[in-house]
Image: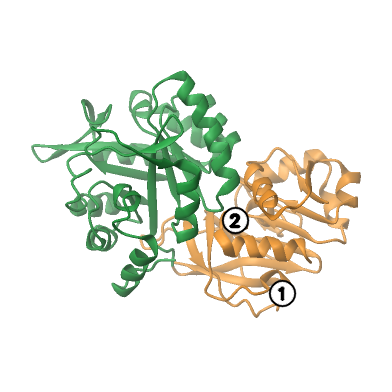
Chain colours: A green, B orange
Amino acid sequence: MVAKRIIPCLDIRDGQVVKGINFLGIKEVGDAVEMGRRYSAEGADELVFLDITATFEGRKTFAKLVEKIALNINIPFTVGGGISTLEDAARLLDAGADKISVNSSAIANPQLISDIAARYGNQFVVCAIDAKNVDGKWIATTHGGRNFTDKELFSWAREAQDRGAGEILFTSMDHDGTKAGYACETYARLSEILTIPVIASGGAGNTQHIVDVLTEGKADAALAASIFHYGEISIPELKFQLREAGVNVR
Amino acid sequence: MIAIIDYGCGNLRSVENALDRLGCEYVLTADPKTIVEADKVILPGVGNAAEAMSNLEKTGLVPVIKSLRRPVLGICVGMQIMCRDSEEGNVKCMGIFDSHVRRFPEDPEAKVPHMGWNCIGNLTLGKCKLFNEIKSGSFVYFVHSYRADLCQDTIATCTHGSQMFSAALKYENFYGTQFHPEKSGDVGELLLKNFVNL
């Protein structure tokens, strides 16, 4: 049986790891390669590096950083942020990324998912969706939750899957940064309607939250940032507790 | 010197990086002479088996690879195209391993692609040096939608849903892993080290 995955997420700006609360109030926390290496050594199953730099210079810095990460880390890693063309994806693949994640650009141009998947395989494409609950309906947002789109979470996730996405990374913008737990019911539904793995993100505050989303929430992987970055939960301890709770982990 | 066969199939970078971490010398090549003279040969591969096989055929390297007497390691699709044939694109493969490659069936409990960390078992099957110091039950990283049947060449197994399949194969000097040792943490690193030391 495939193990449930624990994925630390590192938001990168100008080569440094940062993490904001509710996507605001960005605070610098550490060196990306060092942190990646540490998480890998501690038993993280995968890593996600999201480039939140908006400038061209920043993007170049990020590609260089991806090369450094690939050289130093022996587990799979996903990179995302600012990938809007097949060429962007190709550049990151060449730098050594195992997967890329697309978000806003795929909403603007869903064909992007089809193109990247056709060229590099489904396993290479993670479709990230940031959604907010509006009157009981999950609406996909862009720009860190500021802009609403015309896409509804479940139908968009299914479309992404049909277009060739290999995984769905759904972040609840209502839960992100709150540390009050994941949107478990939504993940369970997502997992039921999709045949590809679902990665849960947004809301982890303690071990129980992660247990919940991997069991009741039926998610295949749990992604978290601040609880790992600030040392609130260590990965070995989390894995131990997940095992105690009967969750199959590496 | 290790030759990594470069036949335009997928990401060689992660294999290069893994060998760099081990401090091994390697060369990316499609040159028959370099491959024949190499101490070890790695055949990587991601993507579609039929495409990989057709790319490899275009290089004219199929007979060269089959004639090698030094250790050869196929990874993922690289391993699959060393089998008899594959349902992916209904392609006849190199026929080194006596195994048929087929798609995982639809199963709500076992998502396809089989992606992530899963444990390997039955490592005593071939008592193979490739798994020196690696225990049954170790987790390694898989990404694939097609899998090789169990056969007499199977030296490690893995189970996904109802399906038990070949996680690794060996025939004489030819080895193959369905998983990605270059992405499988310390266990993968150990396996590559074992391969390099064969």
Q: CA distance from mark 2 to mark 1?
A: 18 Å
* In-image side of B14 versus A100 (left or right): right
Does A85 appear above or below B141?
A: above
- Reading the image, the residue beneath label 1 is B128
Residue A74's disc number? none
- For disc 1, the chain is B
- Residue A97: image x %, image y %? 53, 40
Is disc 1 surrounded by few (<14), some (14 to 19) or many (20+) residues within 10 Å?
some
Task: Determine the residue positioned at 68% across, 73% down.
Answer: B132
Task: Determine the residue positioned at 53% across, 35% down.
Answer: A65
* In-image side of B67 versus A33 (left or right): right
Q: Is residue A165 visible?
A: no
Question: Which amino acid does the dot numbered 2 rest on?
Answer: His
- For disc 2, the chain is B
- Reading the image, the residue beneath label 2 is B180
* In-image side of B35 versus A211 (left or right): right
Mark 2 vs mark 1: tell me if same chain: yes
Task: Determine the residue positioned at 41% across, 57% down.
Answer: B111
Is disc 2 surrounded by few (<14), some (14 to 19) or many (20+) residues within 10 Å?
many
- Residue A63: image x %, image y %? 53, 31
Give the position of the C terminus of chain B as an image quadrant.
Answer: bottom right
Q: Is residue B185 visible?
A: yes
Element type where label 2 sits in the image: loop
Does A250 appear above or below A129?
A: below
Who is closer to the viewer here, B100 or A99? A99
